[in-house]
Amino acid sequence: MRYPPALPPEAAVLGAAALDWVAQVNKLPQPDGIVSANGYAPFPGGTGGNVAEAIARLGHGVRFMGVLGDDEGGKILLRAFKKAGVDTRSTRLVKGERSASTFIAVNRHGERMIFSLGGAAIYTEAAEIDPAWLKGMKVLFIADALQPVALAACQALEQGGRVVFNPGGWSAGSGPEYLGPLFDETDLLIVSRTEARTMTCEPDPEKAVAVLARRLDGVVMLTLGKEGVLLLEHGKLQHIPAFPVSEVVDTTGAGDAFSAGVVVGMLEGLSWAEAACLGCAAAARKIAHLGARGGLPDRQSVRDLIEEMP
């Protein structure tokens, strides 16, 4: 099958893609319990892969910097990238390796349980990062990445390029010695409520976002699910509300859709508050569909949703 050529990339995503095996259940099981699944199917996933595809669907050129196995899962993930128009010049397919995968159980309220199974997913050595991959990039989004690899990508970014760091649960608990050098390179930090608590030991989101802002010379966005986003910009705290959704089918990938919307806002020269609003709209469109990349919107769909709101 031939796919249309990808748009010239403006953003690069350093992270992992994974094949999500999603089971739909009426309720999530208790410990030692068992429930019946109403459906079970594979979907492209992984934080880095989700963000890259979401940026492409929103109409901007994006490059994915990650690793896939040459198994059936890797082939599915690669086809999904090409179909969405993601530039895969910096995506490596490793012979004889199994691609990373997850098992996700989703109940009828969109709540989920996630089990991760490792595999070929990320670059492991700084020397593997080719500076040519970052040439001309306006934004570098760092998701699942080892610190030396992420720092190598930051150093290859040309002057004027900005770094968005989304540590996720994988590295949120790594401590200041690990995260500090990455914070020094970060223009925008995006974290969830849980990640912020892990990184600061502050259960209160407003206190947590203030602690994080003191650790980096940049902007912090703390996502709160249906409660929206806290944005701390140069000492000014704002609350960006979430968009109402009539039916929540699957919250998997909602944070990734939000991140992609923010990156697109940066590429389009929006203010931080406008970019966060765009991210909230992208997440609202996504959670009405099954799968981490199901329902990822195009730019017009997001624009229409924002215009519908007061």
Image (tube, grey):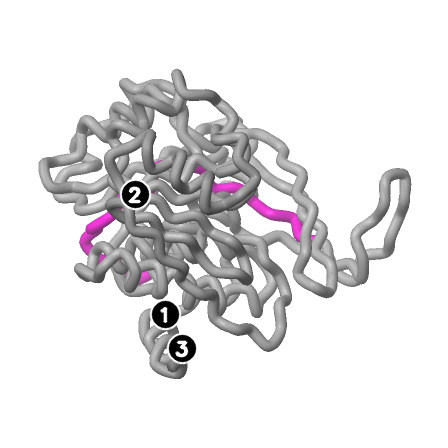
Write down the region rendered in magenta.
1-22
User: Residue 193: x and y, percent?
Assistant: 52, 45
Q: Residue furthest left?
A: 159
| Sequence-earlier tag: 3 or 2 | 2
Residue under the image location 73 percent in, 59 percent down: 107
Using residue 76 as the reference point, say whether residue 250 is left or right of it. right
Mark carried by residue 305: 3
* Three-letter amino acid code of the residue under disc 3: Leu
Mark carried by residue 188: 2
User: Residue 207: x and y, percent?
Assistant: 46, 41
Q: Is residue 112 magenta?
A: no
Q: Classify 277 as above or below 207.
A: below
Q: Is residue 16 magenta?
A: yes
Check contact, mark 1 vs mark 3: CB within 8 A: no
What is the tally of numbered marks visible in this picture?
Answer: 3
On the rendered image, what quadrant is the C terminus found in?
bottom left
Mark carried by residue 212: none
Helix, strand or loop at label 3? It is helix
* Three-letter amino acid code of the residue under disc 2: Leu
Check contact, mark 3 vs mark 2: CB within 8 A: no
Residue 114 sits in quarter: top right
Mark 3 nearby-residue class (10 Å; few <14, some 14–19, many ≥20): some
Residue 5 visible in the shown view:
no
Mark carried by residue 298: 1
Q: Residue furthest right?
A: 33
